[in-house]
Image: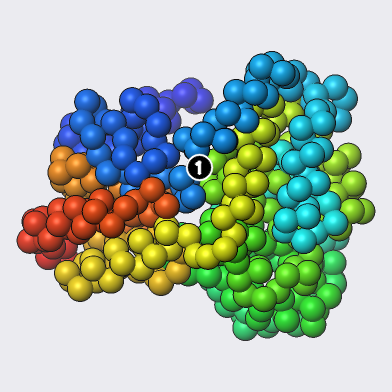
Amino acid sequence: MDLLKKCRVYTRTDEIRDARLYPYYPSFQGPSGGGRAALDGAEVCMLASSDYRALSTNVEVVGAAQDAIALYGTSAAGTRLLSGNLDLHEELEADLAGFFGYEAALVFATGYMTNLGVVSGLAGDGDQVYLDERAHASLVDGARLAKASGAAVREFGHASPGELARQLASAPTRSVLVVTDGLFPVEGCLAPLAELLAVCEEYGATLLVDDSHGVGVFGLGRGVIQHLGLEGRVPMMTLSFGTSLASQGGAVLADAKTIDFLRHVCRPQVFSTGLSPADTAAAHAALREIRRRADGEPDALAAAVHLRRALDALGYDVAGDAGAHVPVRFSDEVTMLAAQRLLVDHGVFTTVRPPACEGFELMLTCTDAHSPDMLEAVIGVFTALRDDLLSHYRRAA
Ligand SMILES: Cc1ncc(COP(=O)(O)O)c(C=O)c1O
């Protein structure tokens, strides 16, 4: 049997292309992190970027990346363990730990690698991993690796501390890692962290929160843990730098002994080139900027509230009520893809659900760069297209 046969018979994307509905790998000409972007020669309102604080084009952040390249070159040029460790990495780690209230931090080359490395580095033979069933793919993949080295892996119902408690009550071991996102963008909701923490404390389990979508946005930039008043109580937190920190990379925050352990055993850390100087410096400058602005709620949140209410009032099926995201549900894949194409043709760029994921949402993501005028223009497009978009619902229903 030819291994590559599955690729040759893979026609799903051809069908979508033939229908002129292919939405993946859009090729932007210029920055895609701001409120506007250039796509196929036209300007679109960009509602698909995770650059929540609009810092990827900020002059301080860009300048820090340029300076780092001038001083350190383009690459860390080795694994941090052996040769690619820079003072830039260590300075960022010290500031991340201080800002988020942990003893220590460890920076990785991506958020995905952070979660992969932390979950698989901590859980193995004799341990148990409990994942929220909607946890990010990188946490799931970390658990798959942990399973390969002997850990037992189970899922609990999305945002369901009650189900977690029932499962833990019948668990044969107390060596347990519980894993959840802090904010679930697709569902538009915060994790019930206080309740999850109470269950973990009762059963002696360790809670890991991936707050990639909460940092910079909630809790005066410190994220969902701070927002919910749980600072100092969640033993471990991870984040991607691809969101509010306007860069590439990721980090885990924990007590000093745990971080030291991970520094030496975590395979994505030990066997991969260190984060580049430019990415490290950009993330650090973005962190400083977020700290400087920590005096009120980000515009991104107010923009999302406004957009959510307006689309709901227009009769769209809007999910959730938290964060910078406005998920709009459609009944099936074709309807979702047709809606996305129609909106792009009218100058509004949203994301669709990736092919391998459940659900048929368009995701509208707000950032600090979305001015009231831009939002009114977007609402105007959704108003003008309402019958077209909603008739797709009805046809498919
Ligand atoms: C919740 C969450 N965690 C981790 C990641 C992975 O981070 P990165 O893009 O930095 O690899 C993402 C997506 O990008 C995410 O949404």
Q: Residue at x 37, y 27 (%)?
A: 30
Q: Residue at x 12, y 60 (%)?
A: 383
The C terminus lies in quadrant: bottom left
Q: Which residue is mark 1?
A: 55
Q: Residue at x 28, y 31 (%)?
A: 38
Q: Nearer the viewer, residue 62 or 362?
A: 62
Where residue 260 appears, as percent x and y from the top left, is 90, 46
Q: Residue at x 49, y 50 (%)?
A: 53
Where residue 126 appears, as percent x and y from the top left, is 85, 60
Asked whether, in this view, residue 367 is left or right of residue 137, the answer is left
Asked whether, in this view, residue 262 is left or right of residue 229, the answer is right
Q: Nearer the viewer, residue 198 or 15?
A: 198
- Could you say which quadrant of the image residue 98 lies in? bottom right
Residue type at numbered disc 1 = Leu
Asked whether, in this view, residue 176 is left or right of residue 28, the answer is right
Q: Height in image: 339 above or below 153?
A: above
